[in-house]
Image: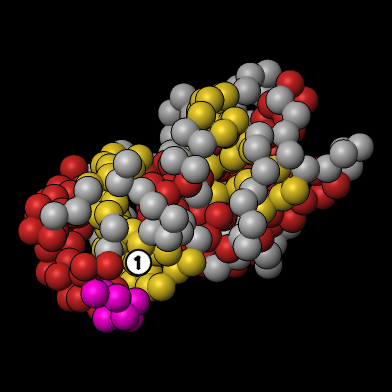
Amino acid sequence: MWYKQTMLILSIETSCDETSVAVVKDGREVLSNIIASQIAKHAETGGVVPEVAAREHIKVMIPVLKQAMEEAEVAWKNIDAIAVTKEPGLIGSLIVGRITASALAFAQDKPLIEVNHVHGHMYSTWLETETLPQYPILVLTVSGGHNELILIEGPSRFKLLAESVDDSAGEAFDKVSRLLGLGYPGGPAIETHAALGKPTVEFPIGLPQENNFSFSGLKTAVLYHVQQNEGRLSDENFVNDTAASFQKAVADALVKKLMRVLRSHPVKEVHLTGGVSANKFLRERIEKELAQLSEPPVFRYPKQMSYCTDNAAMIASAAYHRNF
Ligand code: KG4
Ligand code: ZN
């Protein structure tokens, strides 16, 4: 077996618009986690342009790798394996990370571990725990590219319980933000404006009777609301109330389905991960709902903002923990 008692994994994540390299010991001790974000670049166009993202990864890949090794203060001979995001993601962006990882694994004679990006997010909470989380764990993982409820029954034992039939909640945050003229990325912008407004409009919850999610109807409902209120985008109260109403509808949908799935799958822990886990309103809503259960599961979400959104440390964590 390639794994041993103490294991150092160097991991690479380039699935979207963050170039990240980390060195992680035993799946939880982060020695370095360098993230070069392209947010400023994509804010100019109001969203990620795949071609631009790939070119940015090429520019910063090697400096980020060097910085991660320097900060971790480890020698190449002590790295036990290279982990890399395999999929899903933007193909041009993924290729930069995967070619770098393959070249390193070949040149340094290390095993290469390919990790699914969604599994990476699912293990982001594990980076902040001193002891192992307890199985079974229900993970609500939501970002720009994915939106799922996944049961972890044990190491490498994943069961997909629900997913979005169209857009993810993160994608809806980004599109609605653009519609309201609040820029990219949409999540933080919507959250800030929602905190200043009131949920005055009742937007629809997609597939209310099902476990699966749907956010495209909600996006369209916000579009119609903005069109019906022509000229009001310069009215701060209108923008803030629309943001608050939209955010509430997203949280209602996510919480409703999470609680329904929990009824048929009682678990020891519930984890909220992915970029949308940064949302405080959503965290509080889930916390409140879980507290009402007779035996509330432990609730975790990434406390460090850099572990909510894309980062390489979570890829090393997934590579390690899926075996233990
Ligand atoms: O995980 P991530 O960095 O990339 C993907 O795998 O997609 O997630 C980015 C997504 C974006 O859609 C962004 O708008 C959303 O996470 N996001 C948020 C917040 N911060 C980031 N959504 C809601 N509230 C936030 N505070
Ligand atoms: Zn992600």
Residue at the image position 59 percent from the left and 40 percent from the top = 140
The colour scheme applied to this rendered structure is: secondary structure
The residue nearer to you, when weighing 241 against 126, is 126
Q: Is residue 40 visible?
A: no
So how many labels did they put on this image?
Answer: 1
At mark 1, the secondary structure is: strand
Left or right side of 101 for 264? right
Residue 314: percent from left, percent from top: 43, 55
Could you say which quadrant of the image residue 323 lies in? top left
In the image, residue 73 lies in the stretch drawn in magenta = yes
Could you say which quadrant of the image residue 33 lies in? bottom left
Vertical placement of 57 versus 270: above or below?
Answer: below
Left or right side of 106 for 27? right
Residue at the image position 50 percent from the left and 49 percent from the top = 123
Residue 212: percent from left, percent from top: 57, 24
In the image, residue 213 lies in the stretch drawn in magenta = no
Q: Is mark 1 within 8 Å of ligand 2?
A: no
Vertical placement of 126 versus 266: above or below?
Answer: below
Residue at the image position 35 percent from the left and 62 percent from the top = 8
Q: Residue furthest top?
A: 209
The residue nearer to you, when weighing 225 against 159, is 159
Vertical placement of 19 versus 31: above or below?
Answer: above
Q: Give the residue at mark 1.
A: 23
Magenta region, residue range: 69-75
Disc 1 crowd rating (10 Å Cα; few below 14, some 14-19, many 20+) is many
User: What amino acid is labelled 1 in the image?
Assistant: Val
Residue 305: percent from left, percent from top: 52, 67
Q: Is residue 123 visible?
A: yes
**Quadrant of the image containing the N terminus:** top left
Residue 45: percent from left, percent from top: 26, 61
